Image: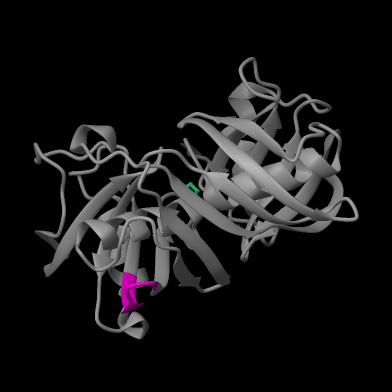
């Protein structure tokens, strides 16, 4: 029987099975199925998906992300903080600041450690991409900021942001009313998003604070989404609800992230990363 070693980690409750591809060999064609298998809470380990920590030719390490439905995503904010923690604590990197390659581009991570244990990670996520073609999003030519769109019979004002992966952000009055499980899956697979989309609902508390809930593409409701929190902060600035250069506290179901869309144009994300357990997975074919 085939086996491989894994580490389960989470960023604010957004949990993935991490596999060190510098030590393990997994068959490329079987990755989507493996992601579904490990994620299954009854017959697998249980997770929001699977993340591979891979060798890179352009950075010390590369991250590949699979959602729990087996689809591959180009970026994952909570995953990046966990990959940074794993890489530092397992000697893949020795500097406290280093680059990570993603399918959505290169990012820089800066870790804060205490006695060799990484507590916080600041990731420079790069510049948000706002052209509809960059999500991709059909039917719009220019950037989409508070455009009225009908989903499942409900009219919502949508702001579209790519952080390497696609996000549709909606501002609502009360986060308790976020139509996560009703409209989330409808928005996710609307034909205007040929590669589907992550849907985020946001209640502004002040210009520097927001509540946030997410329906993730390929995984459904999760406790947190780092790229989604970045997209929400960018959307708040684009809608005149927050300011460039300010730290914005994003309250997610699993805890807080600090996001700053700097004057220079990059989006900075700061938050924790935690290890849950390690183990050996038995692949039952
Ligand atoms: N949880 C992630 C995002 C994971 C990928 C996403 N579901 C997608 O398909 O784009 C995060 O923390 O950013």
264 to the left or right of 105: left
Q: Would you place residue 285 above or below residue 49 in this image? A: above
Q: Residue furthest top?
A: 57
Query: Residue 244 location, x and y as percent?
Result: 32, 56
Q: On the picture, is 59 further left or further right than 228? A: right
Q: Position of residue 63 (x, y in %)?
A: 62, 34
In front: 25, or 175? 175
Q: Quadrant of the C terminus?
A: top right
Q: Is residue 135 visible?
A: yes
On the image, which quarter does residue 147 sit in? bottom left
Task: Read off the magenta span.
Answer: 202-208
Most frequent secondary structure within the magenta stretch: strand
Task: Name the image quarter holding the N terminus.
Answer: top right
Which residue is found at the position 41% from the left and 70% from the top? 213
Answer with left or right where residue 106 lies relative to residue 199.
Answer: right
Left or right, residue 119 beside residue 58: right
- Based on the picture, tell me whether residue 149 belongs to the magenta stretch: no
**Residue 43, how many percent across, how many down?**
71, 56
What sort of colour scheme is used for the picture? one colour
The residue at 11%/40% (across/down) is 142
- Residue 265 to residue 247: above or below: above
Q: Position of residue 15 (x, y in %)?
A: 64, 57
Residue 223: tell me if it is visible.
no
Q: Residue at x 49, y 29 (%)?
A: 103
Q: Quadrant of residue 65?
A: top right
């Amino acid at each position: 029987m085939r086996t491989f070693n894994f580490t389960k980690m989470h960023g604010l409750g957004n949990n993935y099975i991490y596999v060190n591809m510098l030590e393990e060999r997994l068959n490329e064609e079987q990755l989507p199925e493996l992601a579904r298998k490990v994620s299954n809470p009854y017959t697998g380990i249980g997770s929001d998906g699977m993340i591979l920590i891979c060798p890179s030719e352009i950075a010390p390490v590369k991250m590949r992300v699979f959602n729990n439905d087996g689809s591959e995503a180009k970026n994952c904010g909570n995953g990046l903080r966990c990959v940074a923690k794993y890489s530092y604590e397992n000697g893949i990197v020795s500097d406290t600041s280093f680059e990570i390659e993603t399918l959505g581009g290169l990012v820089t991570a800066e870790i804060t450690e205490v006695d060799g244990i990484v507590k916080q990670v600041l990731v420079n996520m790069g510049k948000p991409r706002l052209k509809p073609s960059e999500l991709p999003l059909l039917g719009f030519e220019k950037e989409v900021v508070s455009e009225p769109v009908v989903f499942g019979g409900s009219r919502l004002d949508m702001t579209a942001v790519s952080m390497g992966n696609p996000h549709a952000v909606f501002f609502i009055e009360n986060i308790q009313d976020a139509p996560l499980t009703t409209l989330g899956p409808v928005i996710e697979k609307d034909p205007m998003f040929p590669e589907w989309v992550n849907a985020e609902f946001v209640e502004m508390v002040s210009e520097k604070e927001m509540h946030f809930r997410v329906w993730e593409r390929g995984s459904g409701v999760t406790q947190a989404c780092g790229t989604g929190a970045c997209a929400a902060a960018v959307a708040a600035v684009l809608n005149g609800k927050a300011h460039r250069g300010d730290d914005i506290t994003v309250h997610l179901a699993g805890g807080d992230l600090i996001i700053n869309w700097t004057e220079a144009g990059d989006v900075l994300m700061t938050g924790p990363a935690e290890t849950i357990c390690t183990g050996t997975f038995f692949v039952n074919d």
